[in-house]
Every structure is written in C-alpha cells, then in structure tokens.
Image (spheres, helix red, strand yellow):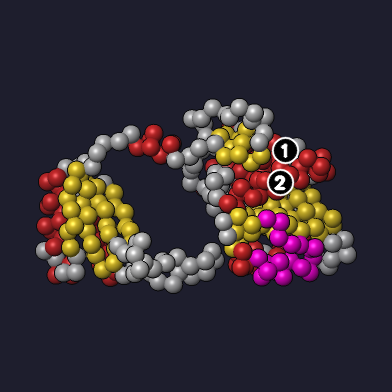
C-alpha cells in the first residue's frame, strides 16, 4: 500500500476527504491537526456535552491510503488541478509497510484490573493469574471496555460495595449501558434482577451479545421499554448535561435508601451534577481519576418524587 499525505486548510478538508474516498479510490482517509504538539495546536472538541469550539483545525494533514503508487499519484494530480484546491500541498507519497492490522489492534487492548481478583479480559488473552472473576469483552461499536477512567471508576465502585450490599441489590439498572459492561459486572458480583438501557439500538444489541458471552442474565431495552418500579442501584456513566436533565427521571428509579452512581463528568462539572440531584439524594464525590469524577449518593427516605 501507498500513503498520500496532504496539507489542507480548514475549508478544504471536507471536500478533499469526500473526493479521495468517493472518486479517487482511496482505501481510507484520516485527518490530523497539522499543528499538533506545537504552540499553534488548538483543541477541536469541547467538554463532554458542550459544543465544539471550532468545526475543524486551521490546517490539517490528510492521510490517504491507496492500493499502489500510480493511484496515489493520479489522485494527487487530479486534486491539485482543481481550482478550489489551490491551498492544498502534497507532503509525501510513500509506501506503507505491511502489518498484521488485526494483531496490531489487539495488542492495544490488554486485560484491565477492576480489583486484584476481578478483571476485564479480551477474548484473545488468557485471564491473569489470580483472576477469580472475569468479564470477557472485546472492543466494538458500543462505549465501555474498561479502559476509560469513568468506566473503571464505576466498575471499582460497584465491586467495592458489592461485597457488603450485592445480596440487597435485587434490582439494578445500568442507564446508558453502552457495551453493557456495568450491568454484566453487577450480575457477576451477585446482583439479582439486572437491566440495562441505551438510546442506541446498536449498543443494545452489542450489550445483549456481551451478556450472553459472559453467561449473565441481563435484560437490555430502550428507556421507554424498561419495566416500571424502582431499583436498589442505578448506575449512569454518560455525560454531564444529560445527567443533569435526567435527574428527576433517574431519581424516580431509585428506591428510598437505594444507591446511585454517576460518572462521565469532569472534576469541574461534579458540583453542577451534585446540585441537580441534591433534592433527592445525599450525594458526594467518591473518587477522581485523570480529571474525571464519580458521584455516589443514597436516596433519602423522605425525598419528594
């Protein structure tokens, strides 16, 4: 394979990407900040739940893969001939070393420890010595492989409290379940009736597959299809703004004296989310990791619904 590297201004990136993929036979196209790791580097994405400050980088490097050098050269020639492409520059046309991409991808995902005895293990790895409980989970379309700090904190909070409380968790809800990892963990740790919900149908399908692969009975459904009633534990690892808007709905799902764990919020956003739930819960930060906070709360018996 051969890689074509192009330097393009912000207003050309979308057009060049479309032309490369749809008309010029590129196998793939990726876009990077041309000023990354320099004083001119700019943040493209905002905080979770907030709009991006800009639609694109001021200058981008486009990496396009082609089957051979002739196709890459023809693509560069045709692009540079367009009047709208005057700001585009060819940086290189170079061969790409063949690699076992499956093995390379797999090497990036290693077993993740929840506790010394509880691990998330991809299917191509053997469980570590001492692992008494294992969730088999491979990266896929849905968020949640145990590698993100918010997921790890939720898993560790659940594992820490399960030793004393799992026998009382007769109903557990994983709200915004993604891959289903938090629901699967609760089931493996001894919770009773475990459910998960997500607005993404692909996530629900992935979560159901993961639950079956791990031998756990978890019911996954869209939010409006989750059975009524309250839960002993609700875990929600989503984003700050949705968590704030969902406060009344999630509070209504937790029984008096039940537990709530919220993640997906940056440290600076934790007070805003805590305030949104203070009407119903005694709630406070449980732990922080890499700039993210997990809030844990107990529903007060006399809280109004």
Q: Quadrant of residue 236?
A: bottom right
Question: From this viewpoint, which residue is outermost toward the front?
Answer: 39
Part of the protein shown in magenta:
270-287
Q: The N terminus is located in which quarter?
A: top left
Q: On the picture, is 260 further left or further right than 222?
A: right
| Image vertical order of residue 194 relative to residue 10, above or below | above
* Residue drawn at x 88%, y 64% as measured from the top left: 302
Residue 152 locus on image (x, y percent):
61, 47
Q: On the picture, is 5 further left or further right than 108?
A: left
Evaluate whether residue 195 shows in this view: no
> Disc number at residue 158?
2
Evaluate whether residue 89 shows in this view: yes
Q: On the picture, is 36 further left or further right than 282?
A: left
* Residue drawn at x 27%, y 57% as measured from the top left: 62
* Residue drawn at x 41%, y 66% as measured from the top left: 44
- Please state which of residues 15 and 117 is positioned toward the viewer in this rendering: 117
Magenta-colored stretch includes residue 281: yes
Residue 178 locus on image (x, y percent):
57, 49
> Disc number at residue 189?
1
The numbered mark, 2 or 1, whose residue comes first in the sequence reads 2
Q: On the picture, is 3 further left or further right than 205?
A: left
SS at mark 2?
Answer: helix
Magenta-colored stretch includes residue 96: no
Dots 2, 1 in contact, CB < 8 A: yes
């Amino acid at each position: 394979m051969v890689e074509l590297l192009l330097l393009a201004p912000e207003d050309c990136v979308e057009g060049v990407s479309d032309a490369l993929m749809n008309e010029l036979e590129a196998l793939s196209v990726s876009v990077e900040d041309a000023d990354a790791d320099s004083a001119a580097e700019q943040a493209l994405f905002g905080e979770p739940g907030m709009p991006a400050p800009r639609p694109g980088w001021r200058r981008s490097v486009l990496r396009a893969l082609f089957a051979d050098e002739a196709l890459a050269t023809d693509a560069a020639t045709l692009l540079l001939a367009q009047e709208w492409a005057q700001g585009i520059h060819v940086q290189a046309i170079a061969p790409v070393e063949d690699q076992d991409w499956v093995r390379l991808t797999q090497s990036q995902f290693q077993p993740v420890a929840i506790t010394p005895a509880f691990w998330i293990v991809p299917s191509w790895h053997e469980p570590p010595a001492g692992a008494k409980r294992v969730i088999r989970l491979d990266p896929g379309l849905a968020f949640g492989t145990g590698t993100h700090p918010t997921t790890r904190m939720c898993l560790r909070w659940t594992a820490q409290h399960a030793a004393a409380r799992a026998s009382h968790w007769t109903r557990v809800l994983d709200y915004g379940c993604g891959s289903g990892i938090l629901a699967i963990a609760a089931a493996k740790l001894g919770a009773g009736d475990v459910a998960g919900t997500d607005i993404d149908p692909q996530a629900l399908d992935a979560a159901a597959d993961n639950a079956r692969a791990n031998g756990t009975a978890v019911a996954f459904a869209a939010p409006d299809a989750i059975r009524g009633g309250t839960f002993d534990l609700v875990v929600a690892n989503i984003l700050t703004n949705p968590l704030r808007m969902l406060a009344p709905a999630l509070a209504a799902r937790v029984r008096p004296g039940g537990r709530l764990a919220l993640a997906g919020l940056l440290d600076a956003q934790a007070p805003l989310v805590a305030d949104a739930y203070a009407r119903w819960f005694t709630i406070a930060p449980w732990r922080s990791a890499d700039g993210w906070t997990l809030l844990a709360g107990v529903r007060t018996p006399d809280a109004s619904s």
